Image: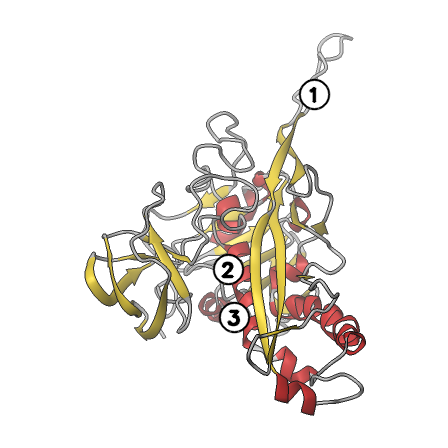
Amino acid sequence: MFDIATETKLFNDYIIPTVPKLFAAKSKMWDRIKKSDKLQLGGKVAKQKVVIAHSQASGAASTAAYPTAQETTPEETLVYLKRAQMFQIKYDGFALETAMKGGTPIDPETFEKDGVLVTAIDDLSRQIMLDGTGHLCQANGAGTGSTALIVDSPYYADATKFLKVGRVIDSYVDSSSTTGITAQSISAVPTTLTATLSDTETWINDEWIFNYNTHATSEAAATGEMMGLMGIISASDPPYPNASAGLQGITVAAHPEWKAISKGNSGVDRALTEDLIASAIDSIERGTITVMLYTMKLRRVWASLLRDYKITDSKTMWGGWSGLPYYYDGKEIPMVVDRFVPDGHILGLDESKLTLFVADKRGEVVWEQGRDGTYLQKVAGYNQYVSEGHVFANLGVSDRGCFFKLYDLSEPTT
């Protein structure tokens, strides 16, 4: 049995400083986006300053009169903090007591490989990339007393990308609070379009699949998932539950400049070319594209194009992440793979316009303590211990016009 001093040493010396580093090492966007813990209303919301329209009080003149002064249209919007990640780690008592190394009762290598942390980091990366809906995929056909779930996805050919064995899911029609599938565990994932439930359920066609207990019917603090890049980098308002209020409470209808550059091809895939990327960057009137994110398959396409262009020194860095270069006006813009980028997409970012609001940017992960001050809580009746942690966060943007989405791009089939 461990005493409080030993448990405190374990968490203070190793786990507390290591977990945020592990998050940064595994998630490119978590690592790169600047973070802020300036929160209001009891820590539930952050205020995000945004620019909607710029002053037009400038130009040539035929008289000595200056133009009538205008103000740039600033807004202060609210970004609601979300329970972005809640997780438990279970430890076997025997392993803890026999794995003494360097004065701490846990092997660091073993801890870093703990599956729940990889799962938590992957799920945060998914949320940062997607559109704030919480959708994992969509039912492709109804089910009545069935365990066979057929799915598709608007973003991925591998529609079961986020359906892992043991994952507990619900299903909903977006605007409804009535579940179809309710708290069912995935027992198998036979193909990229099918999953097997642990028990029979009934659902209707086109119901959205969510992680258990994440569906929200309105945009508010502590409900639903974080906003992500696919909700921000769009020429329209984000999907439900943000559709009626707009991104950060601002609608495109009320403020037409509150949108990103979106370049598709009416749903028809076309080959990636250098000119398509140049056209997307040329469309950015404000801000500077500092990185482009794309899929692994599009990386292969771009690497082939670089070889065709006789560019052999083709490695560039984005912070601690390596990528391939894109040369624009004599400057090198990193093109970096992120495995959560939707198929056939390239996302152009001005990182300075993004802020990841967190409860505490010093640690980011908050660990629960028991009444006696311990982090490891014994499981009654078992020689086992659990620790509980959470990440409260949401992604904010100050100017959507500094981003582009280039999509409907052909990818290799293998």
Residue 335 left/right relative to 263:
right
Q: Earlier in the sequence, mark 1 or mark 3?
A: 1
Q: Earlier in the sequence, mark 3 or mark 2?
A: 2
The residues bearing labels 3 and 2 have C-alpha atoms spaced at a distance of 25 Å
Q: Earlier in the sequence, mark 2 or mark 1?
A: 1
Q: Choose between 386 and 57: the one closer to the eye.
A: 386
In this figure, which residue is indicated by the disc labeled 3? 303
Looking at the rendered structure, which numbered label has been put on residue 222? none
Q: Amino acid at mark 1?
A: Glu
Q: Choose between 351 and 289: the one closer to the eye.
A: 351
Q: Amino acid at mark 2?
A: Arg
The vertical placement of 195 against 38, above or below, is below
The vertical placement of 104 against 409, above or below, is below
Count neighbours of disc 3 (C-alpha within 10 A) and say few if under 14, some if 14 to 19, many if 20 or more. some
The residues bearing labels 1 and 3 have C-alpha atoms spaced at a distance of 46 Å
**If the image is split into quadrants, where does the N terminus sit?**
bottom right
Q: Residue at x 59, y 83 (%)?
A: 383
In this figure, which residue is indicated by the disc labeled 1? 71
In the displayed image of the protein, which residue is found farthest to the left?
Answer: 144
On the image, the x and y values in percent for residue 348 come to 56, 52
> Which mark is in front, 3 or 2?
2
On the image, the x and y values in percent for residue 159 come to 35, 64
On the image, the x and y values in percent for residue 143 come to 20, 59
Q: Residue at x 47, y 71 (%)?
A: 300
Looking at the rendered structure, which numbered label has been put on residue 126? 2
